[in-house]
Image (cartoon, helix red, strand yellow):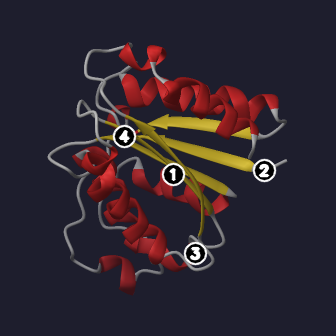
Amino acid sequence: MKKVLILSGSPRKNGNSDILCDEFMRGALEAGNAVEKVRVAEKKISYCRGCYYCQKSGGECAIKDDMAELLQKMIDADVIVLSSPVYFYSIAAQLKAVIDRTVARWLEVKNKEFYYIVTCADEERESQLRTIECFRGYADCVEGAVEKGIIYGTGVYEKGEIKNSPAFLEAYEMGKSV
């Protein structure tokens, strides 16, 4: 059994990438894993101010919000799923804030399996490459990180359209493979 943490970066509850997170979770639960999904937009997480208070305080951040609890979950997880819709060929700001705020204890986030879930209105996977590179940039900073899989949800814009896409089943199957 693995501890799986899904970070749904979609600002839209039940948006397409959020739906894929649910399907991944369903598969991972069926496979016997402990799974938690966090909708980042529902948490109070400010952006990193670059003050480096954390460097002088043993990893405690100067900002008092929901990030300390979320960062502990990231440290404790075996598997981290990063999910975002494509926003101007990058990730949603809510998830980027989480990634940046891991700086407080970034060396403790190690030996993780990473899965990426990306959705976009464009039909081409190439439109998702920069978003995936953002995820990979973070994983490159995580000691012992291993990329395990990517779900490409293309050609979806309206809520729920993803259910008619191959990505819907792929997310479930990938979750089962954890």
Q: Residue 2 carries which label?
A: 2
Q: Please, what is the three-letter code of the amino acid marked with disc 3? A: Glu
Measure how far apart labels 1 and 4 are at the Cα level.
Answer: 17 Å
Q: Please, what is the three-letter code of the amino acid marked with disc 1? A: Glu
- Secondary-structure class at tag 4: loop
Q: Residue 176 carries which label?
A: none
Residue topped by disc 4: 9
Nearer the observer, disc 1 or disc 2?
2
Measure how far apart labels 3 and 1 are at the Cα level.
Answer: 14 Å
Residues 24 and 150: in front is 150
Nearer the observer, disc 2 or disc 3?
2
The disc, 4 or 3, on the residue closer to the chain's N-terminal end is: 4
Tell me residue 90's x, y (percent).
23, 52
Q: Quadrant of residue 9?
A: top left
Say whether residue 167 is left or right of residue 67. Answer: right
- Secondary-structure class at tag 2: loop
Tell me residue 72's x, y (percent).
57, 58
- Secondary-structure class at tag 3: helix
- Cβ atoms at labels 4 and 2 below 8 Å apart: no
Nearer the observer, disc 4 or disc 3?
4
Q: Which mark is residue 108?
A: 3
Q: What residue is rendered at 63% in x and 77% in y?
A: 144
The disc, 3 or 1, on the residue closer to the chain's N-terminal end is: 1
Q: Please, what is the three-letter code of the amino acid marked with disc 2? A: Lys
